[in-house]
Amino acid sequence: MSALKLGPIAEEKPVRVTLELPAGVHRDLVAYGEVLARETGEARAVEPARLVPAMLARFMATDRGFAKLRRSGDRQGG
């Protein structure tokens, strides 16, 4: 198994958010989805739209500064 930060992506009820990504970021997400599919045994590449929420959740879960502020009740960061 590789050292990818993401594992299999759980299905959850989605909330629609629309955003624009730089072309390079999109290409990297497509490539990441292909690698993740190989590593997790999925039949096809994981779509960027499924990767972004999982990546954001992982980022926030491992951000110590965010966790500290969240515990203290300061949700505006300052």
Image: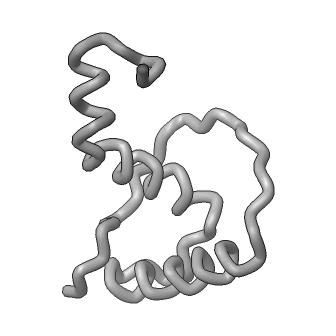
Residue at x 44%, y 87% (from the top left corner)? 35
Q: Position of residue 41 (x, y in %)?
A: 35, 82
Residue at x 44%, y 54% (from the top left corner)? 54
Mark count: 0
Which is nearer the eye, 26 or 22? 22
Q: Position of residue 21 (x, y in %)?
A: 74, 63
66 relative position to 48: left or right: left
Q: Residue furthest front?
A: 78
Q: Position of residue 30 (x, y in %)?
A: 62, 80
22 relative position to 43: left or right: right
Residue at x 48%, y 40% (from the top left corner)? 12
Q: Is residue 32 above or below residue 22?
A: below
Q: Is residue 22 above or below residue 77?
A: below
Which is nearer the eye, 49 or 71? 71
Which is nearer the eye, 69 or 41? 69
| Quadrant (top left, top right, bottom left, bottom right) of the N terminus | bottom left
| Quadrant (top left, top right, bottom left, bottom right) of the C terminus | top left
Residue at x 37%, y 52% (from the top left corner)? 59
